[in-house]
Amino acid sequence: MHSTYLAAMKTFSPVLIVLGVVLCVSATLQLFPALVGLAFETGNHSAFFKSAATGFLAGTICVAIGHFTRTPHLQPRQMFLITATAWIVVPLFGALPFLLLPQGFSMADAVFESVSGMTTTGATVLFGLDNMGQDILLWRSLLHWFGGIGIIGMAIAVLPFLSVGGMKLFRTESSDWSDKSLPRTQQLLKQMVLVYVALTVLCALLFWVFGMDTLNAINHAMATISTGGFSTSDSSFGQFESPVLHWICIAFMILGASPFALFLRAVKHRTLAPLRDRQLLGMLAIMGGLSSALAIVVWQLGDSSVLDSVTLATFNLVSVMTTTGYASADYSQWGNFAIVIFFFATFVGGCSGSTSGGVKIFRLQLCMTLIREQVARAIHPRAALPRAYNGVIVSDEIVTSLVAFLFMMVICLAVMTLLLSLTGLDLVTSLTGSATALANVGPGLGPIIGPAGNFSSLSDMAKWVLCGGMIMGRLEFLTIIVLFSPAFWRR
């Protein structure tokens, strides 16, 4: 019995250490809305202070227990456990402020808002945001910002203990695999955090200079760079009339959906050559083509000028495709052609190694490469056809991973749609709700969860299903699914 206990503790010790550190970081972030609550006399500061104290206590206990039986090397089982546990437990602690607020959020609503924030989905159950306390709005944005860089990515950056096997751990929540020219994992993650912070500060400054007040600029900068999409108004980004603010937001949504490693390479080598990355150019090409088609649709409606049509179309398309989820108009009123474009854009996503969700551009490009390869083999069966992406050889392992990812996404989409339909939701709401959760986008389609609605009217069961979908999508399925395999738990 004693040996079994020690074996279990050795397995879970790194899980507890990482979880404890991340809980302490999360608790520290809760002090900022607590101070804002005191400054604005919202009456909510007590909830944030109590939640922060709870998080610190839980985090300290986890680190203390895990430290006694820590192991020098991470096993694959431990990597999956760390990632899955962090992404399930930390959002639960992130929901504590909502539960402790005087407004009295239900458990389902509090957890949904926290999970949606940390997974940078941006779906919300809150309404009346225009009159909501600045501390609550700030906490929602901080959830985005904390989740955007990735809980495990943050842990690797601050824990030297995880430097061994760190990249393997990072890849349990990230699909980035193609860049081999960057420094070691811990140094890489620290530099990416610095880039993340720098882009957030720059975005906030530009928002502030061009008309936003200070808190709006900070909130929207964090939600934009994290491609999260929580806004401070029920009308989302439509509350701002300035086209300049919309184009600034477009630019930073694109930056948030771009591979952060490219920025590091550009700075390291002092050249813009990394920005000619195939994945980045592919994303920009798709955005340009779909935005142009939508701009024509909006202009033909006759309610907007050419410039306004381009701004509206580009902003909303980029927002959905980067999985940010802002809305500046109810694009469900633009006709069936526009609705179909937005539905498929939901799945596209941004680049690998960014804060965005979705299928990711590199997977779509790999699919096209494989299709061309199959066509060529049909014509020349014995030809030796090289398979490369961005100058990196694409192994059979990567192809298998691609096929498995797409298959798991389709299966999860079908299962979630069926589960949501069992709660009484119509097909459009069930299908697009599942899609937006798995792709971490935010708004769905239809009158209930479309860009003009939110998720507040859904049943608690539907919200729990969507919470599971958001975490599954954020971790790209395998990290969660592998935990249900009996072989995973065998010694």
Image: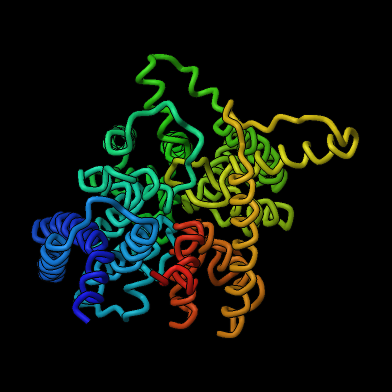
Task: Work out whether residue 26 can be spotted.
Answer: no
For this rendering, which residue is in front, 432 or 18?
18
> Residue drawn 40% across and 63% down?
116
Left or right of 114? Residue 428 is: right
Left or right of 113? Residue 325 is: right
> Residue drawn 81% across and 41% down?
374
The picture places residue 181, in percent across and down from the top left corner, at 42, 26
Q: Residue furthest top?
A: 270
For this rendering, which residue is in front, 204 or 27?
27
Report the label total.
0
The picture places residue 287, in percent across and down from the top left corner, at 61, 38
Its colouring scheme is rainbow
Q: Quadrant of the C terminus?
A: bottom left
Q: Quadrant of the N terminus?
A: bottom left
Q: Quadrant of residue 136?
A: bottom left
Left or right of 10? Residue 358 is: right
Task: Work out whether residue 480 can be spotted.
Answer: yes
The picture places residue 44, in percent across and down from the top left corner, at 15, 68
For this rendering, which residue is in front, 405 or 146?
405
> Residue drawn 66% across and 75% down?
427
> Residue drawn 69% across and 44% down?
367
Q: Quadrant of residue 106?
A: bottom left
Q: Quadrant of residue 202?
A: top left
For this rendering, which residue is in front, 134 or 277?
277
Q: Is residue 391 above or below residue 483?
A: above
Q: Is residue 430 above or below residue 337?
A: below
The picture places residue 13, in percent across and down from the top left corner, at 22, 63
